[in-house]
Image (spheres, rainbow, N blue to C red):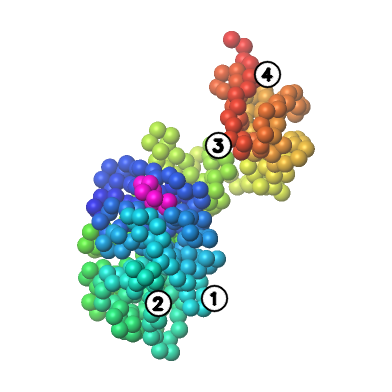
Amino acid sequence: PDREHLIYPLGCTVILKSLKDGKQEFLHGHTNNVSCVTVSKSGRYIASGQVTFMGFKAIHARLQLHKAKVEGLAFSPNDKYLVSLGGQDDGSIEVWNLESKEAICGSPATASPSSTPTTATTSSSPPANLPNRKIRPTECQTGQLKRIVNCIEIPDDLFFYCGTTSGDILKVNLKARLLNSCRPRKQKFSKGVNTLKVLKSGDILVGSGDVLNVVFCHSSSNPHRKVELEGGLTSIAVRGEGHQFFAGTEAAQIYSLGYTDIKEELIATSHNSAVNDVAFPFCSQDDIRVWHAETSKELCKQARTHTDTMRFVRNQMVLANTLFSSVCYHPEEYEIITSGTDRKIGYWEVYDGSAIRELEGSLSGAINGMHISQDGQHLVTGGDEKLVKVWDYSEGELTQVGVGHSGSITSIKISANNRSMVSTSVDGAVLRWRYPHPSSP
């Protein structure tokens, strides 16, 4: 509401980013990926929901009632109440009192057990009997028209708009609960309507698939403009009177667009899947990104093909029948070593990606962490068998074994001076070890 900050989830964290200087604040507290975020009308509260619970990350309160994923959240206009919607395994809608931090009423979100609730929003006069702790659902009359609704937008207390999987938008009278219109009639939005926003001018922003559509309701010459973005659109946020708006996609990209030219500008980007390990370069499931360590800004990204001048080009891939969990460059950069769920340590040629040899790195369980000493003569590993192992790099022989963790080892590193090692584990311990092959002073 202050028009100066952009709020969005990233994994288990909610990020507040200043639009003026780009500074970020991180709100922690979730234990799983955040599924939805909403802000109260006054800007006083932020609510965020995840797969197992929802919570206010100020932290004002942590509210737990839904059995599974929280599908949607919405504040009342007076900031007194919060509405939460459970997903397919929960199927309930709850109203919370922000002052007492308690659930005051609830109800099944759908009339049919086979239906799945997908979105939540509020108007100035919600159909809830708060003193009697009841929610009064009222079915809207759409005649013979049957649609599956993905998203709902209430710009005022006269009408609300529903985006459907069929690619059209339903306009419903909020008081009469009657269908007013359904459009477009011919050229529907491909891949359905994922998200929409109604501007004060009456124009509508529609996210369908990987296309952002702007529907000009008062223009007959150019009623429709669109721009293609990377990844399917998941959310749209409007700044001010609608002169600027932001679009988020499934590819973990956030774009800024102007109302007059509808030209996209990428302002934030991130990996959209788990990052298993970090080396140079590092990657996630679909892309490779190079980051500047001091400014934490992305310098370049490689998705499928190079679009700019590159010093080196590799047409080979490192392939193995395993889920890789760790990768290390040899200090002289002529080889890389990998480890994963197949319990093997793989040596690979950097220049053509060919396999050199494999070591049996573990008798039971995956190898989760690995590191090479600064002189390149030894490497250390740790994994599900809870042992720290030191290996001779050239000979591939096991030289030392360390016992200390009671749970699977998740990461292990050798200090820069080759005198100590540090390992972490799911048992919550961080252990420091004496490195058995210290460098000469």
Residue 244 is at least partly visible in this image: no
First-in-chain label (4 vs 1): 1
> Where does label 2 land, which residue?
137
The residue depicted at 40 percent of the width and 77 percent of the height is 137
Residue flagged by tag 2: what amino acid is it? Pro
> Which residue has dot 3 on it?
279
Relative height, residue 278 to residue 151 (above, below): above
Disc 1, disc 2: CB below 8 Å?
no
Secondary structure under tag 1 reads: loop
Please rate how many residues cluster around mark 4, counting C-alpha atoms within 10 Å: few if below 14, some from 14 to 19, many from 20.
Answer: few
Q: Is residue 1 above or below residue 300?
A: below
Determine the residue positioned at 54% across, 76% down: 113
User: Which residue shows up at 39% across the image and 50% down it?
Assistant: 61
Magenta residues span 55-62
Residue 103 x %, y %: 41, 61
Q: Quadrant of the N terminus?
A: bottom left
Q: Mark 3: which secondary structure? A: loop
Label 3 and label 2: CA atoms lie apart by 54 Å
280 relative position to 107: left or right: right
Which residue type does callout 4 highlight?
A: Pro
Near mark 1 (Cα within 10 A), the count class, few <14, some 14-19 or many ≥20, is few
Q: Which mark is residue 113?
A: 1
Which one is closest to the eye, mark 1 or mark 3?
A: 1
Whether the magenta-drawn stretch holds residue 61 is answered as yes
Q: Which residue is mark 4?
A: 436
Q: CA distance from mark 3 to mark 4?
A: 24 Å
Mark earlier in primary sequence (3, 2) = 2
What residue is shown at x 67% (from left), y 23% (from top)? 377
Q: Earlier in the sequence, mark 1 or mark 3?
A: 1
Report crowding for label 2: few under 14, some 14 to 19, many 20 or more residues within 10 A (C-alpha). Answer: some
Q: Nearer the viewer, residue 307 or 284?
A: 284
